[in-house]
Amino acid sequence: MIRAWLDLPPAGIFGVLIVLYFGTPLLLAVIAFRGPLARPVQSLTGVVAPFFNGVAILFALLTGFLAADVAERGRQAYRVVHTEAGELRNIHTLSVASASDMRAIRAALKTYVTSVVTEEWPAMDDMRLSPNTGAAYDALLHEVSIPSIAKDSGQAVHSALLTATLRVGTARNDRLALSSDHTNDLKWLVVIVLGLLTQVGIGLVHLEKPRAFLASLAVFASAAIVALGIIALQEYPFDGTFQVSSQPIKTLQALSE
């Protein structure tokens, strides 16, 4: 349920929050002032605000923790993409500067870059892996691992190429792990439920005045929608409005073989 909501476009994400957080106050108002339960609910009049601060504080804290997790994941995604692109460029530069002919390495590198941009990036949006990209990386690692490179270009160049290629693999694995991470789904559920419970608490404090009841709940609902909506748009770093771009890797397609 949470994953399906987070996969919606921005209008859908905000639409669900609007229906949920503005629909709940209307439902509570009917229950408290118009429905058959109005009299029992009105008997709760007199509850003071401090008794419900705990729920609001829990909602605020967990929302803050969730926002911090989402922001950190976005920063990690940005770093790993630029690390991967930087190491790929290092491989190309070393292959060009080497005394031996490394056209096979450059061809394998370009195949890998093209596969990442055209196949793996769209697959990450759908939470899938790209077998072709994995095979392209294996082919690149195979070309770099050929023992004759050390003999023709020197052990230092060969070691640098191997190190850069392994770092590409590590960065790719990190990128794939971040794109398929759903560990925040339960946190989202808890935050949304706590938001609804906070609305119930605010409503209990304003049972004596229907207009104040609706006004206070509307203000809270607006704040919750803005905060949770903006955070939700950044939940998946490689998908959505604020996604990390593939441009750093895509620019490597222009490198010559």
Image (cartoon, rainbow, N blue to C red):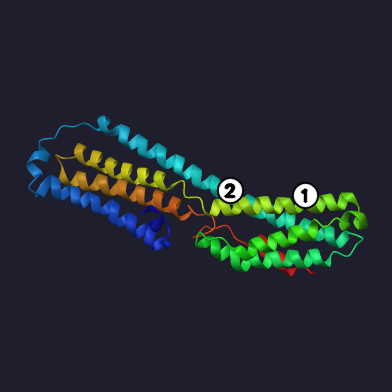
Residue 72 position in % (x across, y down): 55, 45
Query: Which amino acid type corresponds to the residue marked 2 in the rendered image?
Result: Arg
In the rendered image, the quadrant that contains the N terminus is: bottom left
Residue 172 position in % (x across, y down): 64, 54
Q: Left of 100 or right of it: where is 219?
A: left
In this picture, is 206 found above or below 135?
above
Identify the residue at image location x=47%, y=50%: 182
Which of pointers 1 and 2 lies earlier in the amino acid sequence?
Answer: 2
* C-alpha separation, residue under disc 1 versus residue under disc 2: 24 Å
Residue 55 is labelled as none
Residue 68 position in % (x across, y down): 50, 42
Q: Left of 16 or right of it: where is 88?
A: right
- Of residue 163 and residue 88, the one placed in the foreground of this image is 163
Q: Which residue is mark 2?
A: 75
Identify the residue at image location x=26%, y=44%: 216
Residue 119, located in which quarter of the rendered image? bottom right
Whether residue 187 appears in this view of the structure is yes
Query: Which amino acid type corresponds to the residue marked 1 in the rendered image?
Result: Thr
Per the image, label 1 sits on a secondary structure element best described as: helix
Whether residue 251 appears in this view of the structure is no
- Of residue 79 and residue 206, the one placed in the foreground of this image is 79
In this picture, is 179 found above or below 208?
below
Per the image, label 2 sits on a secondary structure element best described as: helix
